[in-house]
Image (cartoon, rainbow, N blue to C red):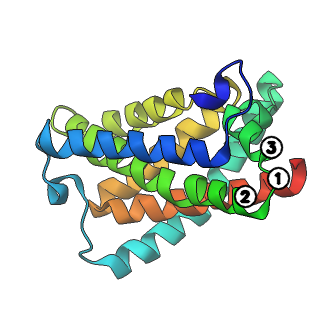
């Protein structure tokens, strides 16, 4: 939320601190307010090797599928503004190596893990209690895309969200979708900083 305000660009480390506070509050709410048990929402390390292999394979597939869908959407609707995402503005303004490392930590590791616990662990698991995967996967993908607030990337983000939900559905482990999500965000960060910074 901070980068979208019409004020001075927030400090990268201030943004990191803010994210840590928000994530901690939500995780505490998950554990103590809705009383979710970590294993029930896929937060465990059982069969981690399988999740690692599946997560890396899903990332490779996601790269082809999401990029393909992005090209189709771009050619059909002429939308190509990835830098419209407010997070990209903060990345552009992160000038020092320490700031860049902090943003990479947030974008490539902390953020994806938190999002997977929330979107796949809590929300998708709840959806599966009332609907089959054929409905839960696209709805979860749509919600995941909508929350990111980037209209120009809505289609590709929905496809990515669906693939992450599919990976979680297959393994019932946050590790699978988190690995895919971390790899996705890291490569996006590296590509963006190489091309636009």
Estimate how packed mark 3 is, as few (under 14), some (14 to 19) or many (20 or more) residues with alpha carbons within 10 Å.
some
Helix, strand or loop for disc 2: helix
Residue 124 in sight in this render: no
Callout 1: SS: loop
Q: Nearer the viewer, residue 37 or 155?
A: 37
Residue 103 left/right relative to 137: right
Q: Residue at x 33, y 77 (%)?
A: 48
Residue 166 horizontal side relative to residue 1, left or right: left
Separation (CA) of disc 3 from disc 1: 6 Å
Q: Earlier in the sequence, mark 3 or mark 2?
A: 3
Using the image, determine if residue 44 lies above or below residue 103.
Answer: below
* Residue 43 x/y as whole percent: 26, 61
Q: Which residue is mark 2?
A: 100
Q: Is residue 14 above or below residue 41?
A: above
Which quadrant holds the N terminus? top right
Q: Position of residue 95 (x, y in %)?
A: 82, 52
> Mark 2 near mark 1, Cβ–Cβ under 8 Å?
yes
Q: Is residue 185 left or right of residue 22?
A: right
Residue for point 29% across, 62% down: 173
Q: Position of residue 141 (x, y in %)?
A: 45, 37
Q: Give the residue at mark 3.
A: 93
Residue farthest to the bottom?
Answer: 49
């Amino acid at each position: 939320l901070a980068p979208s305000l019409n004020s001075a660009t927030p400090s990268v480390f201030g943004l990191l601190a803010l994210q840590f506070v928000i994530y901690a509050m939500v995780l505490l709410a998950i554990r103590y307010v809705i009383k979710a048990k970590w294993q029930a929402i896929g937060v465990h390390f059982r069969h981690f090797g399988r999740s690692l292999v599946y997560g890396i394979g899903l990332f490779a597939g996601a790269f082809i599928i999401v990029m393909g869908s992005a090209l189709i959407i771009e050619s059909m609707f002429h939308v190509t503004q990835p830098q419209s995402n407010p997070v990209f503005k903060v990345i552009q303004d992160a000038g020092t190596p320490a700031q860049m490392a902090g943003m990479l930590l947030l974008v490539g590791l902390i953020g994806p893990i938190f999002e997977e616990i929330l979107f796949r662990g809590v929300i998708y698991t709840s959806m599966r209690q009332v609907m089959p995967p054929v409905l839960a996967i696209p709805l979860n993908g749509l919600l995941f895309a909508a929350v990111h607030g980037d209209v120009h990337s809505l289609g590709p983000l929905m496809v990515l969200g669906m693939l992450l939900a599919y990976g979680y559905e297959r393994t019932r482990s946050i590790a699978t979708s988190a690995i895919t999500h971390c790899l996705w965000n890291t490569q996006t960060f590296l590509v963006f900083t190489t091309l636009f910074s």
